[in-house]
Amino acid sequence: MKTSLKLSLSAAALLAAPLAGAALPTDLAPYFDANSAPSNGYNVVGAYTPPSWSWGQIELLEGKQLFRSEYYNRRTEKLRDQDTYQSSEYPVRTYYGSLNQQLVNGFNLYYKNSCATTAGSTCPVPGPTRPEARFVLLHKGRKTAARTCNVNLTPTLLVHGAMQDGNVWLFPNGNDGTGSAYGGASQVTGFVQDLEAKGRCVYAVTFGNFHGDNFSQATHVANAVSRIKALHPGVPRVDVVAWSKGVLAADAWLTNAPSWTGFSTTRFFERMAAEQARAVPAYNDTVRVYVALSGPHRGIDLNFRHPIHTLTIASTSSNAPVGRGPMPWTYFSAFQCVNWGPDVPWYNNPYAESVCEGSGGTWPDYFRRIYVSNITSLDSTGKPVTGGTLKTMNVNQGVSSSSFNFDEYNMSMFGSVNDSGRYVNAYVGQLQAADDLRGTYAIPDRDTYEWSDVDQDEARYFPWVDQKLVYLAGGYLDSDHTQCKATAFDPVGSPCFAYHVQYAPGYETYAFGYYKYRIIQGLGIAAAKEMGGKFITRLSQRSLDSRLPSLYVLYGTTYGASTDARYETDGMACSTCSVNGDGVLFNASIAAMDQLTQHWTSTKKTASAKQEGMPYGHLEMGVTPAVWSKMSDHFASRD
């Protein structure tokens, strides 16, 4: 094992498969899917034909490699048509219900469970809504499935990002089955139809968990490329386009993850990451063009910078349009919940349909803690330490025992330890993506009014929290807003406190008539990086395989059309300064050509690497015709 981890880049590239048969350490084995004889290959379980307006065909691939077990909560599982959110204001089921159902039907090719389509039923775990890590869907465009595309051209594989699936490449704004898009969007079709109109055969993957493990997803990308090559025996390579989090899967494979070194031999999560890296197939020179489309090559700390976003997650119904991301906290005070909620009928909040419901409505329960994780720290070997079961911790804070649901509360990026003592995490891929970017883009002090026009935290979070605390002149917020934002990075060194005249259990100190309460608690960015196996640290030290004929780094340079996408304003030095990224990711992460080619020769870089920014936001880069044209032109230039 140690020898395999020390292989040189060139030697690793020659491996036909990762080492098989080496037993996992006994403490790590329970965290991997059972596979007594892993091998470098895949099996086509079967194929599903969607309605005629959708994909041409969807195949289910089963990887034969070693996979870390995938876990889910209610916000990360696959949605059936009946599960998809629907209201008069957000008729999401109308436009996405059938598309969601098609994914469940695809995974059900293996599980063959009637729950996939039975109204009101609950699917088992694992099952078609929570598939095991070894499964991935391979979508075929309509012309591709019919073989009416040009099979002699290099085919394209599209890799989606977090909170997405393969459907984003076909119908980026949904489809109600008659061709209408959600919200009357002007862009009805996607990159799949655009490429097929130009004669290219197009495929896309859908991972089981869109926040899932990047090593496992790297294996799925490798298997998908192998499958596409088998379907196109006369074509030597495949073009790969990865968007957002999807680039981390492609990066891991193309940088030869089995050759990654430097993992701790004593720390639990780094030992696990070493096993995962070793299980990824060695890169085999089967990609012609790799388009890295606005991906976090250098990591992301978005979730650590913005309290309002994590509170939106906590307050939103599990199948609503928003709220399916991870929280960088382990608990938070209930008074932050998105308004006084259902406890005050004249100021009800229809969106507080999750763990916030019934909490923070009136001052007596302002400072109840809502626990979204029961992990309090890491021990001397790096294993999680718990403060009791997640249920017990929340019930002690006033949650009804009968209404508590583990899946509803387990929303922390750090995961939780379940009632069986097993560490489970629905957001492993987000832990792996975590990195501290404050050294490049500091969090500025925004106590002054003019920032409210650009910063969502200042405009919505802090003024609103202040209002709630001073209600009936009862309290106030620590005046240092930057300190509150930094709490997620360093919960001990940068605490965020509220002060109130009312007593509640859990206060920290009492002075001058005020009780001091901690607003937010987490484990911090350092723990997140370690629990992610220091994925970004390892990736940043490596180049893509130098046999890659073409790298095209394409990224956004503006907020984008929607002001709601102004997430990365915490990297701006002033309210009128130029933005430092695409509204979600910073330039240091997305404009990463130098990092990806750091060990290439200068001649190789000049011949094979290209980087270009476009005036679009992160959420627009994969769904905008002008961006598609850039990629199509680049493919054509390599034909």
Image: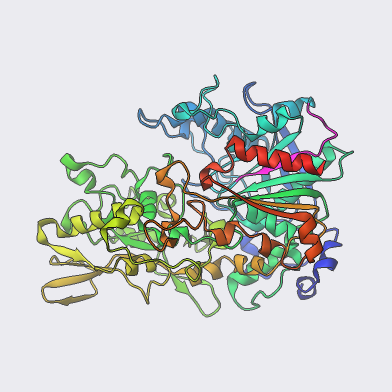
* Left or right: where 104 falls relative to 376: right
The residue lying toward the viewer, choosing from 360 and 241, is 241
* Left or right: where 469 falls relative to 521: left
Q: Look at the image and tell me whether residue 44 can be seen.
A: no
Q: Position of residue 495 (x, y in %)?
A: 33, 72
The residue lying toward the viewer, choosing from 426 and 406, is 426
Q: Position of residue 44 (x, y in %)?
A: 76, 39
The residue lying toward the viewer, choosing from 624 and 253, is 624
The residue lying at 32 percent from left, 42 percent from top is 351
Q: Where is residue 478 in the image (x, y as percent from the top left)?
A: 24, 68
Q: Tell me, yes or no, whether the highlighted magenta stretch contains residue 252.
A: no
Residue with the most extreme right position: 234
Q: Tell me, yes or no, whether the highlighted magenta stretch contains residue 157.
A: yes
The residue lying toward the viewer, choosing from 174 and 440, is 440
* Left or right: where 401 falls relative to 433: left
Q: Position of residue 591 (x, y in %)?
A: 61, 57
Please tell me whether the stretch drawn in magenta is mainly helix, strand or loop.
Answer: loop
Quarter of the figure that contains the N terminus: bottom right
**Rendered position, 269 above or below 61:** below
The residue lying at 77 percent from left, 29 percent from top is 199
Residue with the most extreme top position: 178
Q: Look at the image and tell me whether residue 46 can be seen.
A: yes
State which region is magenta. 149-160
Quarter of the figure that contains the C terminus: top right
